Amino acid sequence: MAKIINGRKIADEFCEQIKERVREVKKNGTTPCVALVNASDDPASEVYISKKKKLAEFVGISSMVYRFDDKVKESSLADLIRKLNDDNCVHAVLLQAPLPKNIRFRELVNLIHPDKDVDGLTTLNQGRLFSGEPGVIPCTPLGVLHLLRTVHDRLAGLHAVVIGRSSIVGRPLSQLLLNANCTVTSLHSYSQDLASICRTADILISAVGKPHFVEQDFVKPGATVIDVGVNRMEENGMKRIVGDVDFDNVSEVAGAITQVPNGVGPMTVAYLMHNTLKLACCY
């Protein structure tokens, strides 16, 4: 049976470290501040914003929440982002996804000043990551790397397979793993013989957004499996969140595995606080 990688416990320990660092920074006259912008009526988005605000309060980071309904104009959001860019008290800006269909996420993200781009999604910060230059790195990939380091003392030379190539998770995570000297294979919807390639992985990460997509025969015995998927399902009249991985069966062969929830999710929010602190004091 696989070792369970307890993302909740690891994130809580990490946040205690962030809390102590925030306390030190405040003594020097700086209060880290993150602006959270939600322009969606999606209930899940509001839950995520509330969690981020609550954790910010816990670690001592100031937060400002801007809420809009799905009738908001793109120009109004653009004006807000420009205003936040000019506000010296705001160190980090997060634009919560998804946005209404009539609003262009990429265009708005690129309006965020790169030095306030807390989730590392601007074209400039992503370019810095891929060129090996210092910049802001997306929160979820950072969280995944943190979890992997709790299992593996050394990542160099291991074969990591990443399923999914989004600009939020798959692509930046693959680059982080390359930077850690892993051998990296990126799989996606056009990949052939996907299961057989996955079975060669020492580290298997799924960020594809399909419930129970990764089955037992995808996994090499003893491999580390990280489930980034968040999928909402209804079974027997009950709503629940499941990952991309068929946890019950995969955990029988994996060496270590994350659960959904309480796996990658808490680490993503923790690294939002980490990045806010980094942007506030450039540590």
Image (tube, grey):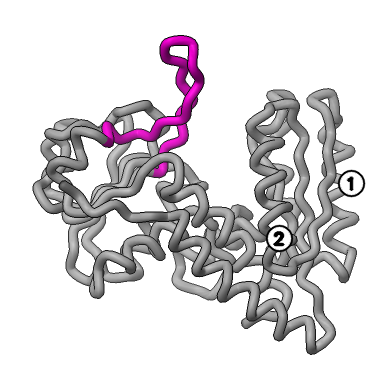
Quarter of the image where the C terminus is located: bottom right
Q: Amino acid at mark 2?
A: Ala
Q: Is residue 167 left or right of residue 63?
A: left
- Tell me residue 261's x, y (percent): 45, 41
The residue lying furthest to the top in this view is 236
212 lies above or below 137: above
* Residue 58 within the magenta-colored segment of the rendering: no
Q: Earlier in the sequence, mark 2 or mark 1?
A: 2
- Tell me residue 254's x, y (percent): 17, 47
- Tell me residue 97's x, y (percent): 64, 38
Q: Amino acid at mark 1?
A: Asp
**Residue 112 visible (yes or no):** yes
Q: Is residue 117 left or right of residue 270?
A: right
93 lies above or below 210: below
- Separation of disc 2 and disc 1 at Cα? 25 Å
Which residue sits at x=69%, y=48%?
A: 109
Which residue sits at x=33%, y=48%?
A: 258
* Range shown magenta: 228-247
Query: Secondary structure beneath disc 2?
Result: helix
**Residue 123 visible (yes or no):** no
68 lies above or below 198: above
Residue linked to disc 2: 56
| Residue neighbourhood size for the residue with mark 1, other residues' Cα within 10 Å, grouped as few (<14), some (14–19), many (≥20) | few
